[in-house]
Image (cartoon, grey):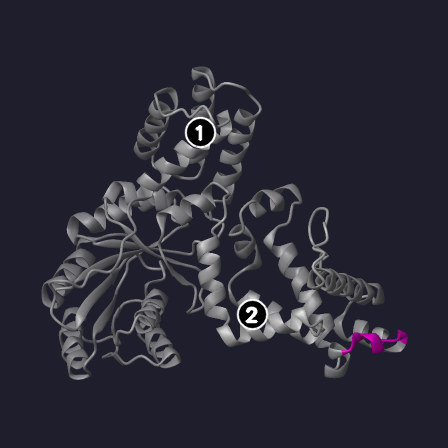
Amino acid sequence: MFESLSQRLQATFDRLSNGGKLTENDVNTAMRDVRMALLEADVALPVVKDFVNRIKERAIGADITKSLKPGQQVVKIVHEELITTLGEPGRLNFSGSTKPYVIMLIGLQGSGKTTTAAKLAVYLRREGRQPFMIAADTYRPAAVDQLITLSKQIGVPYYEEGTRASPPDIVSRGLKAAKDANAAVCIIDTAGRLQIDDRLMEELEEIKRRANPAEILLVADAMTGQEAVNIAQGFNQRVGITGLILTKIDGDARGGAAISMRAVTNVPIKFLGTGEKIDGFEVFHPDRLADRILGMGDIMTLIEKAEAAYDEAEAEKLQKKLMENQFTLQDFLEQLQKIRRMGPISQIMNMIPGMSQLQMQNQMDQETVEKRIKRVEAIINSMTRTERNNPKILNASRKKRIASGSGVEVRDVNDLLKQFRQMQDMMGQIRKGRFPKIPGLPPNLFG
């Protein structure tokens, strides 16, 4: 998400960087480009106008810092105003509510409410709370079955009555079951429609009256586009929402929904969801999302993902192997698999400052990177454990067998071994305190 917007904004900033002093004409030209970039990203027109006017006023006014170059000055202002538009980080608020605290998920059909309910339950459990889920979507085919399957998969208790009872009655009885189970937080998965209608809203209003939720979170598909604003306004006016959860942010959406819904509803974005996997769920941080949009990376989220994938003892063991030159292809395969569990490689790379621009320059799309990584995995998986731990024994016949088993050419096997040796040599020099100067990128194990 936001890839197109990031590219357009970066091109605008690059043009400004070529100039000397920042003039009013420079600002006007840049703001036209920013306005077009935001509109093409499906940001609502009123939001675009307000955003651009604030930037223009600051850029032409007293906020210009002489120590910064023209492009840097505008980037700084755009970054700050983008954070302002995205709003303060929203956190779940359970104050003033009776236990079990109730979180009501609402949204259109297909927005990902049921999957989000399971992701939220896992997050709450990780935070030390006992979650409980209620299947109150009796209209979508297999919605109840999906929630049951997910609940069993993550080990969270649930309540369901199939599809014949009315959702408000299911919720009333489900809340009693949650209280009997001593649950701390109860998540209600409500029904969605392909469009907002009175029957849906009346049902949601009745569920709200009976459940007295601490949070009503609108689950919105980030790929919805301009219609997202109308959807958010409709739900907010009838039910009243306390926060937003944006799903499918790893898709090819232009991203304007995130900016528009937050600005129009004036409620905070609380979580971001990626993909169908249960661990694809993160707390929303406006400054981090602003960094991603402007191609500045997101080191903090990358660190958090890494901490979730690695434990301290494992990291120390890996460091020791690297320093003692005992890092093998088996170790490399294991680390590669851990990195892949952190999310799509292109997402991980975009969290590293400057890497998004590098990917654009080298035309490194996600599909190409993923394909190269799978090829490396296939080659290593075609080796025996002994060969992975001691690649020096790989003679011509072994390499031919490995190439045949992984569906590649022998030269691909040779390239991987050569690049792995280069990495070992580099680590050896670092171990000796030489810190070699390496032009460009480190050895490319995925080339």
Please state if 178 lies on the left or on the right of 118 as rendered: left
Q: Is residue 334 visible in the rendered structure shown here?
A: no
Which one is nearer the viewer's eye here, 137 or 253? 253
Give the distance between the C-alpha atoms of the residues marked 1 and 2, in whole angstroms: 38 Å
- Number of residues whose C-alpha sits closer than 10 Å to that of mark 1, classed few (under 14), some (14–19) or many (20 or more): many
Q: Residue at x 44, y 45 (%)?
A: 291
- Residue 25: image x %, image y %? 45, 16
Residue 96 within the segment the image draws in magenta: no
Residue 393 within the segment the image draws in magenta: yes
Q: Residue at x 39, y 42 (%)?
A: 256
Vertical placement of 135 versus 236: above or below? below
**In the image, what residue type sits under mark 1?**
Val
Please state if 260 lies on the left or on the right of 40 as rendered: left
Quarter of the image with the C terminus in it: bottom right
Q: For numbered disc 1, what is the local secondary structure?
A: helix
**In the image, what residue type sits under mark 2?**
Lys
For the record, the magenta segment spans 390-396
Report which residue position mark 2 lands on: 338
Which one is nearer the viewer's eye here, 394 or 272? 394
Q: Residue at x 74, y 71 (%)?
A: 379
Residue 74 is labelled as: 1
Vertical placement of 201 versus 133: above or below? above
